Amino acid sequence: MTNPRFDDVRETAADATREDDVLSVYTGLVHDDGRREYYFANDTEDASELRETAAVQLGMMVRVLADRSESDVEEITDLAAERAENMRLE
């Protein structure tokens, strides 16, 4: 493993999803073999609330990825949009 903090972060994230006050959850997994899994759920049926929580989560992920990869937000969003257009939901 190249990142020694990976297991700690994974365990912390898994524990955090079990908290009672969580309103929205997204977990995306990329396996060594390229297989992808994603889990997305919100404690709302309202389209505007869903859109807002999804936008907040997406913004958080883009900001972290941009910072950690030493890229700017636009580079990450362009790449993410390209991947999203080619992704099939299962």
Image: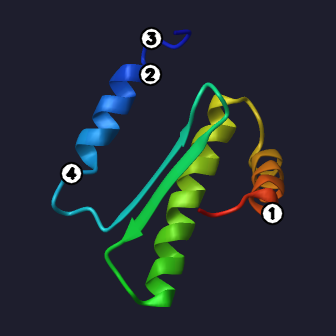
- What label sits on residue 58 in the rendered view? none
- What label sits on residue 6 in the rendered view? 2
Q: Residues within 10 Å of mark 1 (few under 14, many from 20)?
A: few
Relative image position of residue 59 (x, y in whole percent) = 59, 58
Q: Quadrant of residue 21?
A: bottom left
Alpha-carbon span between mark 2 and mark 4: 19 Å
Residue tagged 1: 85
Residue tagged 3: 4
Name the kind of residue labelled 2 in the image. Phe
Alpha-carbon span between mark 4 and mark 1: 31 Å
Q: Residues within 10 Å of mark 2 (few under 14, many from 20)?
A: few
Residue placed most toward the observer, 61 or 82: 82
Residue placed most toward the observer, 52 or 82: 82
Alpha-carbon span between mark 3 and mark 1: 33 Å
Alpha-carbon span between mark 4 and mark 3: 24 Å
Alpha-carbon span between mark 2 and mark 1: 28 Å
Name the kind of residue labelled 4 in the image. Arg
Residue tagged 4: 18
Alpha-carbon span between mark 3 and mark 2: 6 Å
Query: Vertical placement of 2 versus 49: above or below?
Result: above
Query: Which of the two discs, 3 and 1, labels the residue nearer the N terminus?
Result: 3
